[in-house]
Image (tube, coloured by chain):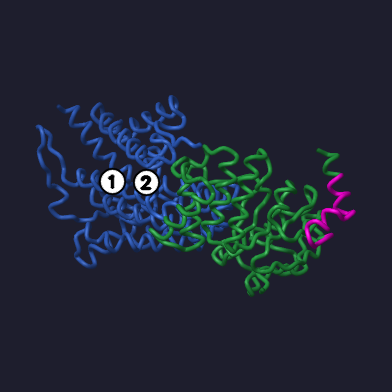
Chain colours: A green, B blue
């Protein structure tokens, strides 16, 4: 298998706060990589660096064999990187279907019928087909999370970045969403998933990395990582805060 | 009958005002840019129409085939080359830059075309009229009104039924997310300005056929455009047409009382509506 995404020595600081500190790892095509770490560890910043909304102070992002570090977010999107947001950000004055169509026509570059067919197909997978003509602003939280996923998938991504997509959902909602994500992964999409709902994450990913203060502090097989002392300390800390 | 006539003439005049306003509304709706130079761009459109008709002998309506693409190109270049750099969280830079642009355009036109009033000659179209129900309707105002409806219908259709329209709405809704969906904001804004100046070209040529113009009249057209947009409610193009009609009718009725009251009556109607409905008559309901 070839490497799809490589982060090499990424650094980004806002003043004295380092959100990425010599961050390096490699994601192989077909991988499902889980990312955990405490709040403010730099997980979402890492996604911003991968999608290109933020440029690094140093280091490189290589995607599908190309150094994309200097590329705009729009160009990276055309090249196959899509993401969902922790706080869903739909185009709220547009319908669910129109939201999907923006991704299909602009990001995936499809036209007319082909774009519509892709959107309908994805909306069925993400169980939003019945809401296709609803204004996106009127969706429930689960609906908005599903729309995040829908838009990302309508971009026909090679790499799908999920940012706490299971957060805030009920157990039942979470399980159905996990099943959808499993299916997406099974269809061949490479996934990087940031999540605090660990059992959801572990149901899908085959590798975990742990990030704290912008540094990767552990990487490996999920079970082993969750058992490691560093992670226990971090997560006990989180438990205590919550 | 005289009053009915004033209302009908005012309604038709409203079509021209709606055309002044449509480009303004489009630009503000998509990129939150208040274009102070809009009136001068209308005048630029009129002068381009004049140049094309006098140099080729084409009828001004056929000259639109050249003026509209030319203005659209100018719009795209202006947006990518200048205005995109001014956009951000602060509304002030684009306001100041377009104000400067307005001064430059006015003086540039003055330099090239002098301050002499000009008019685009449209032959028989200027004076032709039809009678309907005892009223005499000028073909040109009727045509202008029909064009205004067609333009607004076309813009609405573009907005809601095309990929470009979805791109406009997506960028207007959330620029950052739109970028992640593969939309190049700068290019989309360029296309929006091209579309807006295409409409402005139509407005300019029709203005130039209707009345004489000189480089200084832009600011007046800007005010009419603004008033029509605000009366109708921001972000609602059909509302803009209604706004234009209200403004036009107020002016013709004002002129009926006293010719000197024409412009004043329009402004008074605007102020009254602003006092009663600060968001305009049909503001776009945001979710």
Outermost residue on the top side: it is B276
Which labelled disc corresponds to residue B22?
2
Observer-nearest residue: A163 or B62? A163
> Is B242 above or below relative to A165?
above
**Which residue occupies 85% across, 52% down?**
A231
Hey, which quadrant is residue B260 in on the image? top left
Residues under numbered marks 2 and 1 in contact, where contact means CB atoms less than 8 Å apart: yes
User: Both on one chain, marks 2 and 1?
Assistant: yes
Please provide percent x and percent y for residue A64. 62, 72
> Element type at marker 1?
helix
- Circle 2 marks a residue in which chain? B
Q: Main secondary structure of the magenta part?
A: helix
> Label 1: chain?
B
In the rendered structure, the answer to whether residue A145 lies left or right of residue B188 reads right
SS at circle 2: helix
Magenta stretch encompasses residue A92:
no
Q: In terms of depth relative to the viewer, which is nearer, A190 or A202?
A: A202
Residue B140, percent from left and from top = 19, 47
Residue B286 sits above or below residue B170 on the image: above
Left or right: A235, with A132 as reference point: right
Gap between marks 2 and 1, in whole Å?
9 Å
Whether A223 is among the magenta residues is yes
- Dot 1, crowdedness within 10 Å: few (<14), some or many (≥20)? many
Q: Describe residue A198's horizontal placement relative to residue A112 as left or right.
A: right
Q: Earlier in the sequence, mark 2 or mark 1?
A: 2
Q: Position of residue A143 (x, y in %)?
A: 56, 42
The residue wearing badge 1 is B148
- The part of the chain drawn in magenta is A217-236
- Asked whether B152 or B219 is in front, the reply is B152
Badge 2 density bin: few <14, some 14–19, many ≥20, Cα 10 Å: many
């Amino acid at each position: 298998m070839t490497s799809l995404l490589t982060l090499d020595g990424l650094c980004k600081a806002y003043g004295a706060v380092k959100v990425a500190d010599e961050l390096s790892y490699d994601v192989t095509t077909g991988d499902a990589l889980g990312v955990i770490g405490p709040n403010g560890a730099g997980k979402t910043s890492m996604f911003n660096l991968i999608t290109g909304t933020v440029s690094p102070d140093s280091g490189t992002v290589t995607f599908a064999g190309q150094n994309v570090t200097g590329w705009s977010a729009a160009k990276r999107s055309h090249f196959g990187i899509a993401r969902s947001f922790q706080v869903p950000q739909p185009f709220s004055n547009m319908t669910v279907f129109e939201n999907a169509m923006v991704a299909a026509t602009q990001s995936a570059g499809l036209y007319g019928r082909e774009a519509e067919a892709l959107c309908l197909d994805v909306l069925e997978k993400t169980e939003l087909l019945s809401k296709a003509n609803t204004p996106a602003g009127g969706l429930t939280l689960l609906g908005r999370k599903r729309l995040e996923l829908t838009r990302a998938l309508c971009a026909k991504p090679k790499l799908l970045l999920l940012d706490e997509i299971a957060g805030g959902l009920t157990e039942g909602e979470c399980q159905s969403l996990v099943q959808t994500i499993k299916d997406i992964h099974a269809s061949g999409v490479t996934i990087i998933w940031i999540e605090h709902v660990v059992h959801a994450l572990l149901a899908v990913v085959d590798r975990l990395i742990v990030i704290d203060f912008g540094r990767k502090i552990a990487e490996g097989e999920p079970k082993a990582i969750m058992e490691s002392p560093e992670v226990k300390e971090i997560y006990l800390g989180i438990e205590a805060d919550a | 009958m005289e009053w009915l006539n004033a209302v009908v003439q005012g309604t038709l005049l409203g079509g021209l005002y709606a055309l002044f306003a449509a480009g303004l509304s489009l630009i503000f709706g998509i990129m939150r840019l208040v274009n102070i130079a809009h009136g001068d761009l209308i005048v630029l459109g009129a002068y381009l129409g004049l140049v094309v008709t006098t140099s080729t002998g084409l009828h001004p309506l056929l000259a639109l085939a050249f003026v509209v693409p030319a203005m659209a190109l100018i719009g795209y270049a202006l947006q990518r080359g200048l205005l995109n750099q001014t956009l951000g969280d602060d509304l002030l830079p684009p306001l100041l830059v377009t104000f400067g642009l307005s001064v430059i355009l006015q003086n540039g036109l003055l330099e090239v075309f002098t301050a002499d009033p000009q008019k685009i000659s449209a032959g028989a179209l200027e004076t032709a009229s039809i009678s309907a129900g005892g009223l005499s309707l000028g073909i040109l105002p009727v045509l202008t009104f029909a064009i205004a409806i067609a333009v607004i219908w076309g813009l609405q259709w573009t907005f809601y039924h095309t990929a470009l329209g979805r791109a406009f709405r997506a960028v207007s809704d959330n620029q950052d997310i739109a970028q992640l969906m593969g939309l190049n904001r700068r290019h989309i804004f360029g296309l929006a300005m091209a579309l807006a100046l295409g409409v402005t070209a139509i407005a300019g040529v029709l203005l130039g056929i209707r009345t004489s113009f000189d480089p200084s009249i832009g600011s007046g057209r800007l005010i009419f455009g603004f008033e029509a947009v605000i009366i109708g409610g921001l972000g609602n193009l059909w509302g803009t047409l209604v706004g234009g009609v209200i403004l036009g009718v107020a002016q013709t009725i004002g002129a009926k009382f006293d010719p000197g009251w024409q412009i004043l009556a329009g402004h008074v109607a605007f102020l009254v509506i602003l006092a009663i409905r600060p968001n305009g008559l049909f503001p776009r309901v945001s979710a």
